Amino acid sequence: EEVSRTNATGRQESALAGERIVAGELDAFERWSRERRAAPTIQMLRESALTTARLEAEKTLGMLPGLDDKVSSKVIKLAEVVANRLTRSAIIALKDRAGSPEGDALAAVVSEIFGLERSSDEAATDRDTR
């Protein structure tokens, strides 16, 4: 009887540990899944910011003849770093709120503010998954 009780207690502890592992993995999957909903907006924001930064850096470099390639690449890299830093807070907020009504509203606001446009196929997919 003592052995049976000990074994039952051990099985219960193992089951609880297993449930905690499953719950942790489920939380991680749900977080990943929510972040995937924000991915199109985040990708468009990054691409838009980097494209603008590179174009402006190249325009400026065109007005500064005589710079060597090393300096030119540093100016372009600087523009990219600035673009990444300026969009970082928006990207974090989109990831944190993704998959919620608040996240959907935030994605719409970010898209409007930054002039991002999604293809009609992406918009239809979003509507179908709600």
Image (spheres, rainbow, N blue to C red):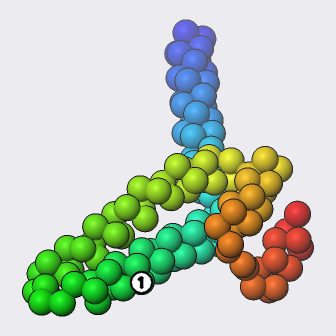
Q: Quick one: 33 or 9, which is closer to the camera?
A: 33
Q: Is residue 99 visible?
A: no
Side (left or right) of 7 relative to 37: left
Residue found at x 73% / y 53%:
106
State the count of labels: 1
Quarter of the rendering occupied by the N terminus: top right
* Residue at the disc numbered 1: 55
Residue at the far top in the pictured view: 2
Q: Quick one: 1 or 9, which is closer to the camera?
A: 9
- Pinpoint residue 100: horizontal percent, then vertical percent: 78, 49
- Pinpoint residue 13: horizontal percent, then vertical percent: 55, 24
- Pinpoint residue 8: horizontal percent, then vertical percent: 60, 21
Q: Quick one: 36 or 38, which is closer to the camera?
A: 38
At label 1, the amino acid type is: Leu
Q: Quick one: 28 or 15, which is closer to the camera?
A: 28
- Pinpoint residue 55: horizontal percent, then vertical percent: 42, 83
Quadrant location of residue 40? bottom right
* Callout 1: SS: helix
